[in-house]
Structures are given as structure tokens and as C-alpha cells.
Image: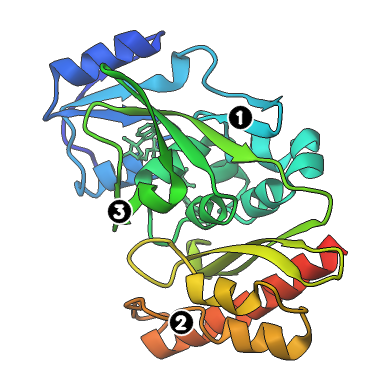
Amino acid sequence: MIPAQFDYQAPTTIDEALSLLAAHPDEAKILAGGHSLIPAMKLRLAQPGLLVDIGRIKDLAYIREQGDQILIGAMTTHYQIESSSALKQSCPLLPECAAHIGDVQVRNKGTIGGSLAHSDPAGDWPAAAIALGAVMVAVGQAGERLIKADDFFVDLLTTALQPGEILREIRIKKGNGRSGHAYQKVPHPASGFAVVGVAVNLSLADDGSCASSSIGVTGVASKAYRASSVESALNGKQLDEQTIATAAGHASDGVDANSDLYASEVYRRHLAQVHTRRAIQAAASRAH
Ligand SMILES: Cc1cc2nc3c(=O)[nH]c(=O)nc-3n(C[C@H](O)[C@H](O)[C@H](O)COP(=O)(O)OP(=O)(O)OC[C@H]3O[C@@H](n4cnc5c(N)ncnc54)[C@H](O)[C@@H]3O)c2cc1C
């Protein structure tokens, strides 16, 4: 449980951090809250030669509203999101999801940017980011680029971030008046990570039917994914019990489900269906 030897730098500007990453392309790794990276280093699953600690860069931890968008700095901790009264009004799915992460210690140190950039298959934020249609702002030496959540999670622990890029900000569009959100999770009893986590963001039309739905699922496969078949089975329909149950039956369509000592593939698919149904029901009831 002792990491391999490494150097440490704590730049105070993004430009300085980008220069360090560019100067050490094969050995540098960004350190945010350290709650995924440090355990990986202690197990020697990661052996970076240089840690670039972005915790001292000013203005990377914030929650702001700008027009119809919510802007969240990458270094914003899970706890800052969980306890934000502004977000409880404008985007309650974010505080709800944050409250499910690990324990108080993890939520006080871990950051939304670190979690998204890590793309842990059992991480909570990726499901919420997909359901909310989040846009990631990545910055590199060539400038900034925007990456949609649907394109961001590429595979197990792999995102669309290029080497040398820093995830700087997460952008989320505010919902309309008749929108409802919910996050449902089965936590692993030892780690708290998601065996299954389902984030739902839906809106209702004037006649009460489902005008749009957006559903992100984590824990089931090698990366978080959009449950498109569930969305198609909901859109345009009245959200009665039968419609919701039938739609939720498609929660793991088209994915290779994980299997481990705690949850077999069959059990995981079952949990995904049950918790998708519950999350849709909760979101629909909140949208009324
Ligand atoms: C006991 C325990 C329980 C946990 N339970 C849960 C849980 O229930 N749900 C959950 O979702 N997570 C859980 N976590 C993980 C926790 O949420 C981590 O904080 C999170 O996954 C990583 O965020 P971090 O800020 O700690 O990132 P770090 O560990 O510092 O970094 C993680 C990775 O992302 C990269 N990175 C970090 N920030 C950036 C950035 N801005 N741009 C580009 N790359 C970046 C790093 O180089 C590294 O590869 C748990 C962790 C522990 C230790």
C-alpha cells in the first residue's frame, strides 16, 4: 500500500498546469481530490512519475448560473454540490446524486471533475451527466473544446479527454417548469459505489404525457450509458404504471452487463430494470 516514487507540482494557473502536462506527456497525471487516483497509486495500478495538483488553481471550484445554463467548476466537491441551495432549486438531480456518493470524507475531498474524468464504471456522476445532457469543457494547449456527455465516456476508465487536456467546467441546461429528476442507486455494501445507478430527467407536456426523457445508467456495464430504448418507450406516452414498467424492462438492452462476486449479470440486469422503473416513477411524480 505504498505508492511508487513520484514528483509533485502544484501550479496556480491553468496555463502552468498545461505546460507541466505538455512537458511530461508520459509520466504526468492530474491530481484533483485524490480519492480515486491515490488508492490506485497505493495499489500500484497507477505509477505516475509526476502529480500535477490542480487544487491550488484559483476559480476551478464554483457553481454559477448563466442564462439558462448551470456552470460547475471541475474542482467543485461532491459536498459543495450536495449542499448547494441554488442547485436544489435549479437542478435537484445534482445534489440528489452527490448525496449518494461514498461517505462524508469522500464527498468533502472528491470532485465532480475528477469523477467524470476517471469514468469509473460504478461512479455516480456519469449517469447524472448523461441524463442531464451535460457538456464538458476541456482545455488544452490548443484551446478549449466542448464534449457532450454522450461522447465523453468512451470505455472503462477512458474518456474523450486527450492527453494533456484538463476538464475545466461542466455545463448543464436548466429544466423547464414541468421537468422532474430522480436518482436511484443500489450501493455496494463495502465501497458505496454503484452496483446499479439510474438517473432520470424527464419533462411532461400539457396533457401530462412524457414530452422528453433522458436516462443515464451506471454500474451495469464497462461505462455509463444512455438507456435509449427506455427513452423511446416513454416519449409521447402517458406515464402510467404499465408504460413505465414496460419501458424499464429495456434498461440494459444492447449492453454487455458486468458480473462479479457481488452481482451476477442476471442480477445486475434485474436491478437495472427495477431501479429504472422506480427512478422514472419518482421523476414523473416530481414533474406534476
Ligand atoms: C472509500 C471511497 C468510496 C467511494 N465511493 C464512491 C461512490 O459511491 N460513488 C462515486 O461515484 N465515487 C465514489 N468514490 C470515488 C470518489 O467520488 C472520487 O473522488 C472520484 O471518483 C474522483 O474524484 P477526485 O477528485 O478524487 O479525482 P482524483 O482521484 O484526483 O483523479 C481521478 C482521475 O481523474 C483525473 N482527473 C482529475 N481531475 C481532472 C480534471 N479536472 N481534468 C482531467 N483529468 C482529471 C486524474 O488524473 C485521475 O486519473 C469513492 C472513493 C473512495 C475512496
Q: Give the crowd class for mark 1: few <14, some 14-19, many >=20 residues within 10 Å.
A: many
Q: Mark 1 against mark 2, which lies toward the viewer?
A: 1
Q: What element carries label 2?
A: helix
Report the residue at 69% width, 82% height from top: 244
Q: Distance between the residues labelled 1 and 2?
A: 33 Å
- Work out whether 118 lies above or below 268: above
Q: How far apart are marks 1 and 3 (CA)?
A: 23 Å
Which of the numbered marks, if any, corresponds to residue 166? none
Q: Does the residue labelled 3 lie within 8 Å of ligand 1?
A: no
| Comes first in the chain, label 1 or label 2 | 1
Q: How far apart are marks 3 and 2 (CA)?
A: 21 Å
Q: Give the amino acid type for the residue marked by disc 1 in the picture.
A: Leu
Q: Tell me residue 202's x, y (percent).
A: 70, 62
Report the residue at 23% width, 15% height from top: 20
Q: Mark 2 points at which residue?
A: 268
Q: Tell me residue 81's x, y (percent).
A: 66, 38
Report the residue at 86% width, 70% height from top: 207
Q: Give the amino acid type for the residue marked by disc 2 in the picture.
A: Arg
Which of the numbered marks, if any, corresponds to residue 154? 3
Q: Mark 1 points at which residue?
A: 71
Q: Give the amino acid type for the residue marked by disc 3 in the picture.
A: Val
Mark 1 in CB contact with mark 3 (< 8 angstroms) = no
| Comes first in the chain, label 1 or label 3 | 1
- Work out whether 111 lies above or below 140: below
Q: Is mark 1 on a helix, strand or loop?
A: strand
The quadrant in which residue 8 appears is top left
